Image (cartoon, grey):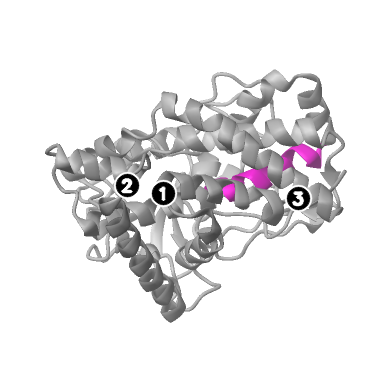
Amino acid sequence: MSETLRLPLPAEGPLEPPAAWAELRRECPVATVRLPSGDEATFLTRYDDVRALLSDPRFARPTSQDGAARLAPEGAGGPVVDGELHDVVPDRGEGHQRWRRQVGKYFTAKRMTALRPSITERADRLVDAMLEQGQPAELKGAFGFPLPVSVICTILGVPAEDAGRFSHWSDAFLNVSRWTKAESAAAYTEFDAYMSRHIAGVRARPGDDLLSMLIADASGGEEGVSDAWLLRTGMGLLVAGHETTANAIGKTVAMLLADRTRWERLLAQPELVRTTVDEALRLDVNLGFGLRRYLTDDVEVGGETLPRGATVVCALPAANRDATVFEDPDEMLLSRSPNPHLAFGAGPHACLGQSLARTELQVALEVLLRRLPTLRLAVPVGELRRVEGLLVGGLSEVLVAW
């Protein structure tokens, strides 16, 4: 391919991969693409190349000082899109590893197991509300978003009634086309003020939430736990901790109902829910624009030398369909195991909350299968629509009936 491709690449359907992925992996695994901002970047589509770059500790998400290729067009997006979030919470070197060690103490297998009953209870209440409201229902709004938002409220120790504000702020941070730069910046300022008040309250009356744990660690001698650090940590967890999972719930259910024999198999074999969640994550074609990495050194990728200062976009969903790694890569095999997909990234920047995300997705499926066994899409698959401009990818609506 000699021409510069423009992201996002077109696809025939909302759940179908762009045809260009297979050709790029085969003919041009190190390609040049144009981002929504108009800036150019290098685009990687092969599994081994993507995993190698993500696993290299030298490279991280761009910050606002890097001069990297921008995602958002001029006048769109906000501080999170521009990389300012990572200027306070370090994304490189020992500072980043210390941050991961501190925050990672919360996301233990024991704590995720302890959270599971309350997540199940919340999911059941949401289904109760759907049944009371009647069909058809918009699954994403009625179930997919409220569930992880309520969980992140618990993790951050904020009142559940503020969940709607969290959803607004998160969307304003992550959509590069829906909001103006001024609107996104206003949302950032509102959230900053909210979290500042909340952190002051947590310092006065600590609980068992993540922020209380971090403050207690600081009292015990941990470095770097300033109010600014706590603010950006809370904001990062808000963005990463519910928007991605909320969209993943809608996409997973849509994939299973698009070919309802998959749903029927899960009804017959509910023990497959765990492997099904990872297979849906692997097969998800709608993961946004890809993970950006800023090259602080020259690096060889796919037989080419990429120069220091280049911006690389790692196409996770394209890599997750690489036939050199996955047998029948375009098939949804509910029992696929092992499944070394890259939906959560890899290496020193792999998603810290992936155990939480898996737990939420598993619970969501378990509850829907138990409560709504006759669930089906209320519209043809071809009428599903992707959310335009969303960095983490998603479907605008998932209408269902039962």
For this view, does 16 lie left or right of residue 343? right
Foreground of the two, 342 or 318: 342
Residue 211 rendering spot, x and y as whole percentages: 32, 47
Residue where numbered disc 1 is placed: 157
Q: Secondary structure at mark 1?
A: loop
Q: How many marks?
A: 3
Give the residue displayed 55% in from the left and 49% down from the top.
150
Label 3 neighbour load within 10 Å: few <14, some 14-19, many 20+: few
Q: Position of residue 163 (x, y in %)?
A: 54, 58
Label 1: how many Cα within 10 Å (few below 14, some 14–19, many 20+): some
Query: Is residue 342 in sight in this rendering?
Result: no
Label ID, residue 80: none
Q: Are marks 1 and 3 in contact (CB under 8 Å)?
A: no
Q: CA distance from mark 2 to mark 3?
A: 31 Å
| Residue 301 on image: x %, y % | 34, 41
Q: Earlier in the sequence, mark 1 or mark 3?
A: 3
Image disc number at residue 211:
2
The correct choice, above or below, for 326 with respect to 233 in the image is: above
Vertical comparison of 238 with 76: above or below: above
What residue do we see at 50% from left, 60% from top? 166
Nearer-N-terminus badge (1/2): 1
At a point 80% along the width and 58% down the height, the residue shown is 383
Please tell me which of labels 2 and 3 falls first in the chain. Answer: 3
Q: Which residues are magenta?
A: 244-259
- Report crowding for label 2: few under 14, some 14 to 19, many 20 or more residues within 10 A (C-alpha): many
User: Which numbered tag is attached to residue 129?
Assistant: 3
**Could you give the CA–CA distance between mark 1 and mark 3, rounded to whole angstroms?**
24 Å
